[in-house]
Image (tube, helix red, strand yellow):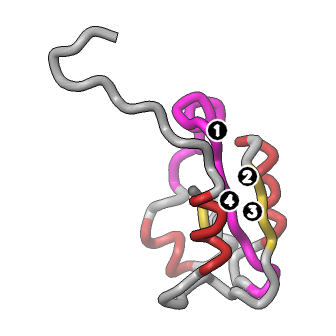
């Protein structure tokens, strides 16, 4: 699940200083490592909705643009919980020492 996503520092020196955006994103590897990608963004977020939609395109995520959610910093997010609960169940991971 991705919430309030972006992939550049968006010209912000304080974001650049963190170093999160200093290496290239390997979208093909990220996508190959995931099953269903559930993604939430809001047009009222300070992070670019354009970048969030680009990420959705690269990952093929189930993209939800919800109004007036900002950067999703509220204690409860019922729409996000509903999205999680609607996902198909995960396959159990093999236990240590078992053969797949």
On the image, the x and y values in percent for residue 57 come to 81, 46
Corner quadrant of residue 63? bottom right
- Report the side of 41 relative to 19 (left or right): right
Disc 1/disc 4 C-alpha distance (Å): 15 Å
Label 2, label 1: how many angstroms apart (C-alpha)?
8 Å
Q: CA distance from mark 4 to mark 3?
A: 8 Å
> Residues under labels 1 and 3: Cα distance?
13 Å
Provide the residue designation for mark 4: 39
Secondary structure beneath disc 3? helix
Residue 35, position in %: x, y?
59, 36
* Location of mark 1 (residue): 27
Q: Is residue 36 magenta?
A: yes
Mark 2 vs mark 4: give the one in front: 4
85 lies above or below 26: below
The answer to whether the residues at label 3 and label 2 have Cβ atoms under 8 Å apart is: yes
Q: Which element carries disc 2, helix, strand or loop?
A: helix
Q: Which residues are magenta?
A: 22-44
Q: Which residue is mark 3?
A: 52
Question: Dots 2 and 4: beta carbons under 8 Å?
Answer: yes
């Amino acid at each position: 699940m991705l919430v309030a996503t972006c992939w550049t520092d968006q010209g912000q020196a304080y974001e650049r200083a963190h170093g999160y955006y200093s290496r290239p994103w390997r979208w093909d590897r990220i996508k190959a490592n995931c099953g269903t990608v559930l993604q939430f963004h809001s047009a009222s977020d300070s992070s670019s909705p354009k970048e969030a939609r680009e990420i959705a395109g690269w990952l093929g995520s189930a993209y939800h643009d919800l109004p007036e959610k900002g950067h999703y910093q509220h204690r409860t997010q019922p729409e996000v919980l509903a999205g999680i609960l609607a996902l198909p169940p995960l396959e159990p991971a093999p236990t240590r020492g078992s053969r797949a």
